[in-house]
């Protein structure tokens, strides 16, 4: 969340930043917060004055009694003060609770380099990499091809789990394992520590790392339990250091989160968003970094390059876009999307998301670092290294052959027992 001190000291500056998001609701929430915060500060001052008065009256009563004089008036006054204090404290607690709730709904301040725009159509292209493949035949839908290869079964998954799920089998299951192994290997060589986090989180820490709307729109809740299935390993990994003060020499902390991810979203907008593209369950390797504020810009670019290096080695064409003010979401201060090329649709589709959240998550989670003299909030960053389902789709499209086979990217062949090509198998 945003620092309330900054809001108090520079409300116009914060409001101007929020205006860039072009969401009327955020400005209304901000104006309401400023109003309530002022009321709270006035009430806090009045409460403190009453506490001071209570102490002074107590001293006066003691003096009057010691002088053996009538203290009845002061005793009556002393009796009334705690009642007034209690009333004000109740109002104060209610205002504090309301202020906190509003702070959680107000989005992060945007970095000045974030391009202005209303939606994803106005994201700014940074660069394109890779050679666009040319095909002399009509490409098969990746889901259909996956079934023909004996590598996926959607019908049986729907039978037992419903839409948005799939069985991954045989060589495609091995290919997914290869993708994860290869991604983790790249990251560990760069100093990232692999972590398998819990797949379930309580609401309190979860509310500190994501948009509160996600609880209703994205995440699955365990019935009658204060537990949610994670939508990405970023969430438990960032929450892992909740209420901790790290040592400066430890930073940056770099984690490679390995997890299954669960999301309510599902493809509903055309053939190519079905299959392996938008699903309820998928595996992902996630990059998460804790660093000093002055290092976060550099760390952001490094996280992005790690994912780009992976795609270059896989020989999947891609482009990088800087996400605009109207498309960025509430948690990130700055965000890049990496989009892989779909030769079937002849367009780029999002496969990675690289966010610098500055101190927004850390302030909620109370994660600081100490340099021996003072404590400061860390900055948190995250980026997808590989979301296997979406990457499998791009491999099935970009490496498809006229004969209905799929060539295994060269860098993955050592992880596939030397297998160079996936061929159709009889349906079981």
Image: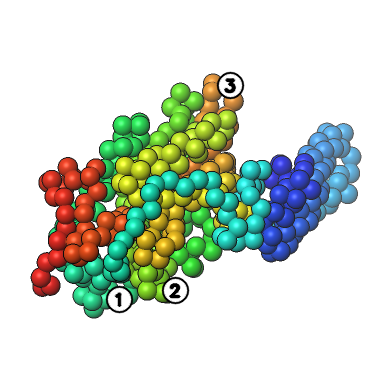
At 20% from the left and 65% from the top, the residue drawn is 404
State how far apart marks 1 and 3 are (Cα): 56 Å
Where 264 sits versus 351, above or below? below
Q: Quadrant of residue 411?
A: top left
Pick whichever, 196 or 428, lies toward us. 428
Contact, CB < 8 Å: mark 1 with mark 3?
no
Residue that numbered label 3 is attached to: 373
User: Residue 153 placed where, x, y %?
Assistant: 21, 70
Pick whichever, 164 or 350, lies toward us. 350
User: Residue 67 placed where, x, y %?
Assistant: 87, 34
Q: Earlier in the sequence, mark 1 or mark 3?
A: 1
- Which label number is shown at residue 162? 1
Circle 1 — which element?
loop
State how far apart marks 3 and 2 are (Cα): 55 Å
Q: Quadrant of residue 45?
A: top right
Query: Where is the C terminus found, in terms of image quarters?
Result: bottom left
Visible residue check, residue 93? no
- Nearer the camera: disc 2 or disc 1: 2
Q: Earlier in the sequence, mark 2 or mark 1?
A: 1
Residue that numbered label 2 is attached to: 269
At 49% from the left and 37% from the top, the residue drawn is 301
At 45% from the left and 65% from the top, the residue drawn is 218
């Amino acid at each position: 969340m945003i620092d309330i001190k900054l809001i108090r000291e520079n409300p116009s500056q914060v409001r101007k930043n929020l205006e860039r998001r072009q969401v009327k609701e955020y400005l209304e929430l901000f104006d309401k917060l400023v109003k309530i915060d002022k009321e709270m500060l006035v009430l806090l001052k009045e409460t403190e004055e009453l506490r001071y008065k209570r102490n002074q009256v107590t001293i006066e009563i003691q003096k009057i009694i010691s002088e053996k004089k009538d203290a009845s008036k002061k005793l009556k006054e002393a009796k009334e003060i705690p009642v007034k204090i209690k009333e004000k404290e109740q109002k104060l607690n209610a205002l504090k609770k309301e202020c906190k709730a509003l702070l959680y709904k107000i989005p992060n301040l945007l970095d000045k380099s974030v391009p202005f725009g209303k939606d994803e159509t106005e994201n700014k292209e940074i660069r394109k990499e890779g050679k666009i493949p040319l095909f002399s035949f009509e490409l098969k839908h990746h889901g259909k091809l996956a079934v023909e290869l004996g590598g996926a079964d959607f019908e049986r998954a729907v039978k037992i789990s419903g839409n948005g799920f799939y069985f991954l089998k045989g060589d495609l299951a091995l290919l997914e394992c290869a993708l994860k192994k290869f991604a983790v290997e790249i990251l560990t060589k760069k100093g990232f520590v692999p972590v398998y986090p819990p797949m379930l989180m309580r609401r309190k820490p979860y509310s500190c790392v994501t948009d509160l709307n996600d609880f209703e729109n994205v995440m699955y809740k365990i019935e009658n339990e204060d537990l949610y299935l994670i939508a990405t390993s970023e969430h438990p990994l960032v929450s892992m250091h909740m209420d901790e003060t790290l040592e400066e020499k430890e930073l940056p902390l770099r984690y490679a989160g390995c997890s299954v991810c669960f999301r309510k979203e599902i493809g509903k907008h055309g053939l190519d968003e079905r299959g392996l593209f938008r699903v309820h369950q998928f595996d992902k390797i996630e990059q998460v970094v804790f660093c000093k504020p002055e290092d976060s810009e550099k760390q952001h670019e490094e996280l992005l390059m790690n994912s780009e290096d992976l795609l270059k080695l896989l020989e999947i064409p891609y482009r990088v876009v800087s996400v605009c003010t109207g498309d960025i979401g509430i948690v990130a201060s700055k965000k890049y999307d990496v989009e892989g090329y779909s030769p079937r649709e002849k367009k780029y589709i999002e496969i990675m998301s690289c966010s610098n959240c500055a101190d927004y998550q850390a302030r909620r989670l109370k994660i600081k670092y100490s340099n021996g003299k003072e404590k400061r909030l860390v900055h948190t960053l995250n980026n997808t290294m590989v979301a296997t389902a979406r990457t499998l789709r791009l491999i099935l499209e970009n490496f498809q052959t006229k004969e209905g086979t799929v060539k295994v990217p060269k860098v993955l062949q050592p992880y596939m027992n030397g297998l160079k090509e996936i061929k159709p198998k009889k349906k079981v």
